[in-house]
Image (cartoon, coloured by chain):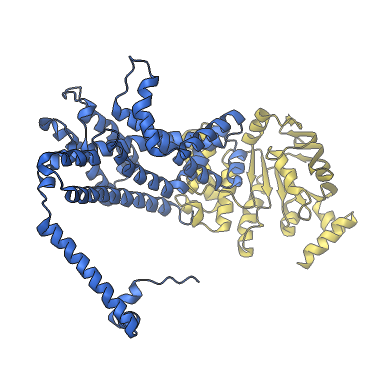
Amino acid sequence: MKPIVVAKNLTKSYTKGLRALDNVSLTVNQGKVLVVMGPSGSGKSTLIRTFNGLENFDRGELNILGIKVDSTHDERKIQKIRRRVGMVFQQFNLFPHLSILENITLAPVHVQKRRQADAEEYAMYLLNQMGIDSHAKKYPSQLSGGEQQRVAIARALALKPELLLFDEPTSALDPERINEVLDAMRRLARQGMTMVVVTHEIGFAKDVSDQVLFMDSGKVIETSPPNIFFSNAKHERSRKFLNQLDKQ
Amino acid sequence: MLKLYTISSTISFKNARKTLFSNSFNTIITLLIILFISVACFNTFEWLIFKANWKVVISNLPLYAFGSFPANEQWRPATWIISLLSLSIFTLWGPEWKWLRKNLLIVWVGTIPLGLYLLYGGLGLSPIMSRQWGGLTLTILLTVCSSLLSLPIGIVLALCRQSSLPMVQKLSSIFIDVMRAIPLIAVLFFGQLLIPLFLPVEIEIDRVWRAIFAFTLFVSAYIAEDIRGGLQSIPNTQIEAANSLGLNQYQIIQYILIPQALRIALPALTNQSIGLFQNTSLMAILGLVELLGIGRSILANPEFIGQYIEVYVWLACVYWIVCTIMAVLARHLEQRMTINQANF
């Protein structure tokens, strides 16, 4: 088992005393899916944003794909990580001035220096996989939220990443659009992609994840396989959170 | 919902009766206004057709267009102006050839070296000194060259003002603020009168280029502020997305920030270039015989003395026509950009 993400005692505080991350340690092995859950403000977004250097941390150590980073936030190492790690955001964050195809080929052409024609061919293959190849020439604003999020997944996949990070990928979608995105993510998981997913989708977590990590106020409360977490959570705080989710 | 009172609702007769003649007071006011407008129109047309002596305009048309450019070479600036005009018409109503549409910007930029070559001469054309340039040709040349030069400088200044390096940030802020605090005429005076004093005697920049540099300095400060506004309205999440794709800082500026900022700033940039076109007339006071300068020198001719109104009405029409063309082109560009991405 090759570890892809190893975090040791990550700690970050925005203001004195208030900790966004409090001694977080975790491991994600190759081909595994880790689902991160927790109430809002619990630090789950902050946690996965440290994995590709969008957030810095104050103490601890991070090893992504064998590249070690610490609190000095070495730009060169972070660039190296970003070339091998894809990220999908809650608000899609597509580039509005570029067509769908250009959105996807931008990084392969300019970061990996691939030929335009090759990048486009691979982009069309990815769009086909996502079931939206007919939209290739359109612009993001002409697509629905679910379609935009699938474009964002294709954009993250275009660099052939070894790890995919999802930051609440379905939270900004209409309820009837959520499944098309989750289905795409399920397919990726089946194909053996290593993923870290911040989400509140219990169904997805039950089906797909190998581990569920529950956080509250920056601390890891528990890490369990999904069958245990959802039926018989070890910790009182997790059970309370799951009850709240059920009620919604 | 906000409801604007539109002219179209008062234009039909029924509405006119209801709104314009609803009571005796309104009727009197309406009649007075109609009387005033008709008298004004009548006098204007009477003056335009019968009283005005248009000889001052008609017999001097080549002067207005080309200044004192040698008569047998005037086909050169004429070719340039006609090529600009036909390019405008083509841009607005031309056929949708894909390869040409894609390269239209390059063609537009290419008109500048073409114009300079036609005016300066050399390479087969007899060389002509810049002091013989004038009229509408010079006005357009000043506008086009200054706006093309000030756009990249404005972009760089805007980026520098956002920079995290304190020295760079301070210097560009100071430049922008100073330029915006000085009246344009002072900058132009500086360009015409003081630059030659600072430069060693051997180096001589001709007056047209000194004017272009002065305009560029001034306008680029304003353009920088317009573009900074565009940059600031781009959400930070765009930069995060680009970062997470591994793009470096320069690639983010080039592919993500500048295209979006330019699109947002486009209406303001149009405004700047129309303003610049009109401001070139200030050079008439500083001795360049551009469109207004030619008008003044024609008025100084004893044959046409005192015919101010004819000349200035004519000049106003020419300025108005060129500004309208510029505005229509800019609106066309804006529409093209919004078709690309509705609801940007």
Q: In this view, does B288 lie to the left or right of A36?
A: left
Q: Can residue A39 be seen in this view?
A: yes
Closer to the camera in the image, B135 or B226: B135
Instruction: Write down which chain is painted yellow.
Output: A
Quadrant including the N terminus of chain A: top right
Say which quarter of the image contains residue A62. Answer: top right
Instruction: Write down which chain is painted blue.
Output: B
Closer to the camera in the image, A145 or B6: B6
Q: Is residue B90 left or right of residue B173?
A: left
Residue visible at 13% across and 62% down in the picture: B46
Closer to the camera in the image, B285 or B140: B285
> In the rendered picture of this protein, how many numbered marks are placed on residues?
0
Residue visible at 25% across and 32% down in the picture: B114
x and y percent of residue B152 in the render? 43, 34
Say which quarter of the image contains residue A237. Answer: bottom right
x and y percent of residue B77 in the render? 19, 35
Closer to the camera in the image, B198 or B73: B198
Residue visible at 35% across and 80% down in the picture: B19
Q: Is residue B331 left or right of residue B257?
A: left
